[in-house]
Image: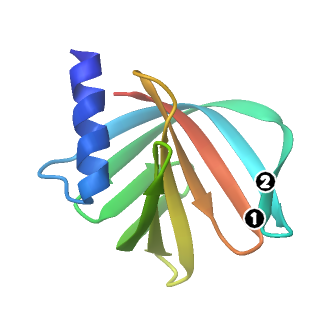
Amino acid sequence: MKKLLLTLLITLSSLVSFTQSLYGRAYEFHLGEIINDEIQWLYTPSPTNILIQFNDHEVIIYSEEHQVYQIEREMGRENGTTMWQAIDKKGNYCWLFLTIIDQTELALTVRYDDYAWMYICKEQ
């Protein structure tokens, strides 16, 4: 059942249109900075327990401060990763990357011009 739901999430994420909310549970957090247009991950990953909600044209991360990202447009797909341009709740532009890791896991990366963070998630 989980494989079926993850497959559905991946298919729907590539279409950027969810008919209902889908959820992932992040269990690992990575923080990085942008150097020469590449993400340099800092420190070791931190364990976390954060709910992530995927809605129609919106991603909500229920961390200490709710992070809300409105998806503006798809920027492309490559090697299991879909990239979107998005706007955060303060009106700042950023990019969201949804990457398939394996049948049960995915990574959601939020990237700005100078820093990025990534959540490794399991389907909820």
Residue 115 is marked as 1
Residue 87, given in percent of the width and then of the height, sits at 46, 77
Colouring: rainbow
In the displayed structure, would residue 114 be above or below residue 108? below
In the displayed structure, would residue 69 be above or below residue 25? below
Observer-nearest of 76 and 116: 76
In the displayed structure, would residue 28 be above or below residue 60? above
Whichever of labels 1 and 2 marks the residue nearer the N terminus, that label is 2
Q: Label 2 sits on what residue type?
A: Gly
Residue 32 is marked as 2
Residue plotted at (52% across, 30% down)? 101
Residue 91, given in percent of the width and then of the height, sits at 50, 84
Q: Quadrant of residue 43?
A: top right
Observer-nearest of 120 and 38: 38
Which quadrant: the N terminus?
A: top left
Q: Residues within 10 Å of mark 2 (few under 14, many from 20)?
A: some
Q: Quadrant of residue 113?
A: bottom right
- Gap in angstroms between the C-alphas marked 1 and 2: 6 Å
Do the numbered discs 1 and 2 sit on residues whose CB atoms are within 8 Å?
A: yes
Q: Quadrant of residue 48?
A: top right
Per the image, label 2 sits on a secondary structure element best described as strand
Residue 72, given in percent of the width and then of the height, sits at 36, 77
